[in-house]
Image (cartoon, rainbow, N blue to C red):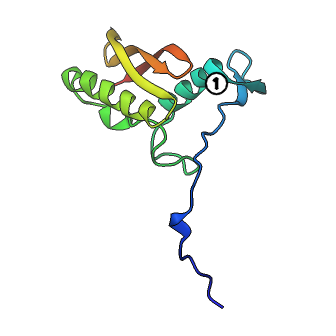
Amino acid sequence: MIPSTAGFLDRDFEIKKQPSQTYKMDMDNSLVRGYTDGLEAMKQAVYKIIMTERYQYIMYSWNYGIELLSLFGEPVTYVCPELKRRISEALLWDDRVRSVDDFVFEFPGKGVVHVSFTVHTIFGEIKAEREVEI
């Protein structure tokens, strides 16, 4: 007997959002202990996304993370707008992120770009930053 899928798409489906509760990362002590939710969980998610190189880890979807390796050796005039685009693109994959703005670029040393920005989420605003070697 062959299973029938007739009428399957005619059913009413309810789409539920995944909870934001996750394990709590204790960065000061390099530990994962307890749980966190809401804005604190979102801060961790933003940190993990901008610190994970896209396509480098088989455990993550190809939609997860940020592409920074290809910026190495490029001129600053190319890197700054590209960083803005790539950071926004990486974070907006998360449906809890509404927008990313207020980008500020600094150049603390040769071959280094420091970018700070604001992430607007359903839980509130998060100030984030990342330093990239080019």
Identify the residue under disc 1.
41
| Neighbour tally class for label 1: few under 14, some 14-19, many 20 plus, Cα within 10 Å | some
Question: Which residue appears at 37% of the width and 28% of the height?
Answer: 88
Query: Going by the picture, which residue comes out furthest to the bottom?
Result: 1
Three-letter residue code for mark 1: Ala
Q: Quadrant of residue 73?
A: top left
Viewer-proximal residue, 117 or 13?
13
Q: Is residue 20 above or below residue 9?
A: above
Location of the C terminus (image quadrant): top left
Question: Which residue appears at 38% of the width and 14% of the height?
Answer: 114
Q: Quadrant of residue 133?
A: top left
Q: Quadrant of residue 31?
A: top right
Location of the N terminus (image quadrant): bottom right
* Image location (x, y in percent) of residue 62: 46, 48
* Image location (x, y in percent) of residue 76: 23, 21
Viewer-proximal residue, 15 or 60?
15
Viewer-proximal residue, 34 or 8?
8
* Image location (x, y in percent) of residue 53: 47, 37
Q: Is residue 107 above or below residue 97?
A: above
Viewer-proximal residue, 39 or 73?
39
Dot 1: element? helix
How many numbered tags mark residues here?
1
Question: Which residue appears at 62% of the width and 88% of the height?
Answer: 2
Left/right of residue 52 with respect to residue 92 in the rendered view: right
Question: Which residue appears at 31% of the width and 32% of the height?
Answer: 71
